[in-house]
Amino acid sequence: IEGQSAIDRSMITGESVPVEISLGDMVTGGTLNTNGRLLVRATRIGRDTVLSQMARLVEKAQDGKAPIQRLADRVSAIFVPVVMSLSVITLISWLVITGDTQRSFQAAVSVLVIACPCALGLATPVALLVGTSRAAREGIIIKGAHVLEATRNIDTIIFDKTGTLTTGLMTLQRIDEIEPDHLAAVKAVEARSEHPIARAIVRGLNERGVGDATTVEEFTNIPGVGVSAIVDGRRVEISRSANHDESGSTIVEATVDGRAVARFTVSDHIKPTASAIVAELRALGVRPMIVSGDSAGPVQHVAKSVGIDVRETRFAVLPADKLRIVHELQATGAIVAMVGDGVNDAAALVAADLGIAMGTGTDAAMQAGDLTIISGDLTVVPKALALSRRTLRIIQANLFWAFAYNVAALPLAVAGLMNPVIAGLAMALSSAFVVANSLRLRR
């Protein structure tokens, strides 16, 4: 109801560029006022706030994700009683047929020993332990066995833009000097501003070796407009330009005594590995998409730069919209992975068949994700999928071996062709095979 400022809404939209607001604009509780003074009236409290709604979206998505039942548990639940019954039947049958108590009990005990489901019980946890340890060395945290199953059929991957495909940090991309010898004055004025765009310009000028002006007086921060000051007796004003480029970058114009002297192009920087990662995922048969809270220009520019079809982009979406998009894709039969780093991605990360969180992002995203990439390096995403799929294959091989060994050896034990000592040795060798097979994941 009073004041002007720039609001950092990255918690809601994920975008790093502050939004200029003034009298009559709506603001969201939990967002950050980057400069200026605001007097606001609370129109929603408690459960009605945007933050509470986002929390409920995450909780609802968590409730809707069905637990994955372990195959080994299901098999063991049936296998153990069957083997116990078979042992009793073997004992009775041998007693009736031969009347030899010693051979009857030997056959019955051999059945119990050879069918001991040690290998079956080791098949999943040992492979999971080795796989998750290897993943940890690669900077990947895997939350559980259900994550491995989820990676098997992933055919669509959704990327958030800011902080995922881009660095999430505003950087100075280009300087157009209209008049020379004014960059030091611009740097001196911007250095006194706390605005993210101003900080990006100062960093960029420092990297380019621009020095400092001698004196800055009468510094004024004009919320929603820019900054102004007297530098060496001249009025320097810096504000957003009315011009825009097709990439959606922010253009800042500097004037000295009313004359335009320089323009600065500032934007979020695309991660250098993004294009290669998109190509690698396509080679794995995965369809990449971008779903972002940013406007159409920046989203489509990033999509073109990294090799994603602009038709596979969604822009200006809120957290509830991201969740809806995930559900819509799943309804068409897609197996969806979501890669994100912000609070606004949390609900979609939970709802996706596989949620991949960037470790450089928020705690909420990491809590919601199934996989966490600690370094935030996109190159790890294909590695995470490949390692998860390989671990799953090892688990499946272990389960097949453990079950096949029991099925093959049980008839021999029932027929009395295997004594308990040999049965115990065979059981131990089966368990050793499962462990050795799992250790292949270390390579």
Image (cartoon, rainbow, N blue to C red):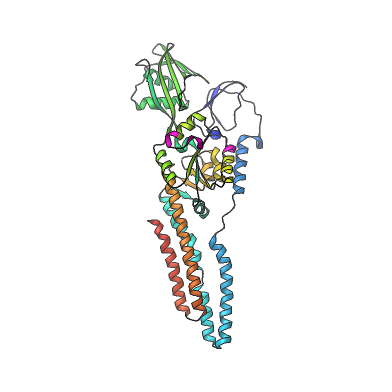
Residue 291 seen in render = no
Q: Single out the residue that lies furthest toward the bottom.
A: 99
Above or below, 129 against 162 in this view is below
Q: Compared with residue 306, is residue 355 higher up or lower down, i.e. above or below?
A: below
Picture coordinates of residue 20, whole percent (x, y): 54, 24
Where's residue 55, x and y in %? 60, 40
Q: Toward the viewer: 397 or 70?
A: 397
Looking at the image, is 337 positioned above or below residue 182? below
Residue drawn 57% across and 63% down? 74
Magenta segment includes 246: no
Magenta region = 304-321
Q: Position of residue 126 (x, y in %)?
A: 46, 60
| 227 w.r.t. 50: above or below | above
- Residue at horizontal 58 percent and vertical 72 percent from the top: 82
For residue 381, say whether it is visible: yes
Position of residue 426 in the picture relative to residue 8 (left or right): left
Where residue 437 sits, quadrant-wise, is bottom left
Q: Quadrant of the C terminus?
A: bottom left
**The N terminus: image quadrant:** top right
Q: Which residue is drawn at the image coordinates 46% and 63% (left, top)?
A: 398
Quadrant of the rendered image containing residue 12: top right
- Residue 149: x and y in percent read 51, 54
Residue 306 shown in magenta: yes
